[in-house]
Amino acid sequence: MTLDRAPRFQPDAMLRVLERHGVHYVVIGGLAATLHGSPLRTGDADICPARDQANLTRLAAVLVEMSARIRAPDAPGGPSFACDAALLSSVQLLNLTTGLGELGIAFQPAGTEGYEDLLRHVERNDLDGLVVPVASLEDVIRSKRAAGRAKDAAALPTLETLLSMRKRSS
């Protein structure tokens, strides 16, 4: 599949492909914030996958199935890459364009130690029968604080308000 323009963002479909292949991952970033009730919308999905060889092999199969390409501003369809476990084991971050929208893969999101760290406080969200692992709201805030990007700083007041409301109601 050649991508001449950004495909429509289909996060449910992305997560279903990950689940069908048995990939171990945690949803992070803006999509995690949205799943926690943030009114701020994102145009991509971000995940933090486990780094074991078997999981990287499953993740590579997902990326091939989704026609993943490197996200590059000067190449709308994005350049192709060797999508295999060897490559995945050698990178920390990948920003991709897929047939289901944009996907970010961060093996060690800012402010975290990666998958195992996020798994300690993971929450399970049921999306019409698909149960997905989502980073806790506290971990999303921790990561956005550590990232230090302007868009993350802009989201923090909303996320901190959500967290405060959640704590008051429990």
Image: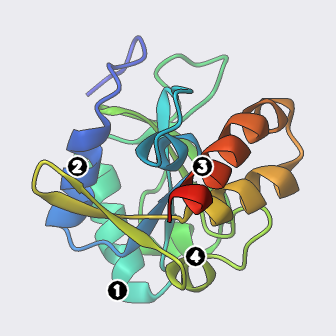
- Eyeballing the image, is 47 above or below 79? below
Residue located 71% across and 55% down the image: 141
Residue 80 visible in this rendered orientation of the protein: no
Task: Please state which of residues 28 and 70 is positioned toward the viewer in this rendering.
Answer: 28
Pick the quarter of the image with the N terminus: top left
Mark 2, secondary structure of its residue: helix
Q: Mark 1 or 3 closer to N-term?
A: 1
Q: In whole angstroms, how far apart are the C-alphas of marks 3 and 4?
A: 22 Å
**Which residue does the numbered mark 2 point to in the structure image?**
65
Label 1 close to label 4 by CB (< 8 Å): no
Label 1 close to label 2 by CB (< 8 Å): no
Residue 52 visible in this rendered orientation of the protein: yes
Label 3 close to label 2 by CB (< 8 Å): no
- Eyeballing the image, is 49 above or below 117? above
Residue located 76% across and 50% down the image: 144
**Which residue does the numbered mark 3 point to in the structure image?**
165
Task: Please state which of residues 135 and 162 is positioned toward the viewer in this rendering.
Answer: 162
Q: Mark 2 or 4 closer to N-term?
A: 2
Mark 1 surroundings: few (<14), some (14-19) or many (≥20) residues within 10 A: some
Q: Amino acid at mark 1?
A: Ala
Query: In this rendering, would 67 be left or right of 145?
Result: left
Query: In this rendering, would 68 be left or right of 12?
Result: right
Q: Mark 1 or 2 closer to N-term?
A: 1
Mark 4 surroundings: few (<14), some (14-19) or many (≥20) residues within 10 A: many
Q: Between tags 3 and 4, which lies in front?
A: 3
